Amino acid sequence: MIITTTRQHQLRQHLPGRTTARAAGSVEHQAALAARLTARDKWLLALLYEHRVLTSTQIQDAAFPSDRSTRQRLRELYLWRAVSRFQPFRQLGSAPMHYVLGPAGAAVLAAEHGLEVKDLGYRHDRAMAIAHNQRLAHTVGVGDFFTALIARGRRDPVRNGEEVTAWWSETRCARHFGDLVIPDAYGRWRSATGELEFFLEYDTGSESLTKLARKLLAYARLADSTGIATPVLFWLPTSRREASARSALARIHAALDRTADVPVATAAADLLGADAPSYGPADEVWRPLGTRLTQQASPRHALGELARAWPALAPAATSDLDDVNSGQPAAFRLPPPSPTPPDATPGRTRRPGC
């Protein structure tokens, strides 16, 4: 009857709650996830394990077609405890949601590689501790750099063939090169001009320029030990700091026994401002240090063109090798699956210079 009108909210179903921590580790929950997780979900879990934390914006750039689909899928992964999240404090505005690997996601990764969760070195409290880590902004900045490259390869149909083919975290780099140098990341960028492998040094402006420049000495020792010349790319926050850094880098670089063993290029983040024509770090923002390209009319060069600045640089290796002797599962090959994941099994990253 009209006098007993049913309220709309009474017709709504209860919103699904988040799986409890105890249930997330159960056999039943793992069985349920087997029917829910897609290839893209599992790739994302591996990416979070490798790089510790990614923002919702970075995840959208890396794997999703829209903001709505990103938020919807991440909410589901959060409810299943495949991922966990936090939101850092900001003085002005609000920070994007930050995501880390959750306990159920770690169990899935371990099971895929025939390991126990403890063999991954994973603990949920340690994963969430990145929220209070003083290097959070630095870690997120490195993620911004690479996800911008991934987004360019995924979303710009004009530039077919451009893609990130490897992205190693600082932790993985430390396992392989830590006795000599610990880069912020190792990456490979494929373009029409070929494939460029590089080490990234991501500068936030808090480190002295002398300390920054002296890292070239460690990269020279690495090149001498491996016999492989790998470019070192310095990403700086402003053009002003870049100019000062180039002076400091040039002094150290010129004193090296074999300068060709340590190719160097610099770029500044403020070149990607709202009024700048550049799309991201793959565009014409790079200046090689002490090469003939520095003297050409255009002072900046695209990432894919940097290999031409160093004619003696050996081509990047093309063979696929497992990440052996690391005790960790190999990272998935980049770029990520398409929004509708294919059935193909992802490949693996390649050891630099092999």
Image (spheres, rainbow, N blue to C red):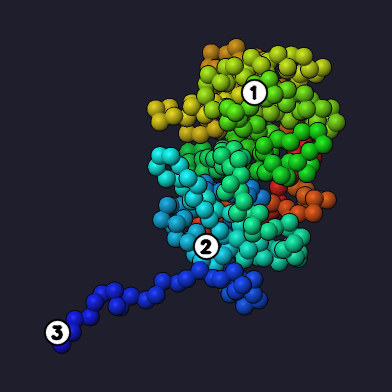
Residue to which mark 2 is pinned: 78
Q: Residue at the spot x=39%, y=75% of the render?
A: 14
Q: Residue at the spot x=47%, y=30% of the render?
A: 272
Residue 223 is situated, as x and y percent measured from the top left of the image, at 80, 29
**In the rendered image, which quarter is residue 115 located in?**
bottom right
Q: Name the disc covering residue 3, or none.
A: 3
* Tag 1 secondary structure: loop
The answer to whether residue 77 is visible is: yes
Q: Does 213 sit above or below residue 78?
A: above
Residue 45 is situated, as x and y percent measured from the top left of the image, at 61, 57
Q: Does 11 sit above or below residue 156?
A: below
Q: Cα distance, mark 1 to mark 2?
A: 40 Å
Which mark is first along the chain, 3 or 2? 3
In-front residue for pair 196/193: 196
Q: Name the disc covering residue 289, or none.
A: none
Tell which residue pokes out farthest to the right in this image.
225
Kind of residue sitting beneath label 3: Ile
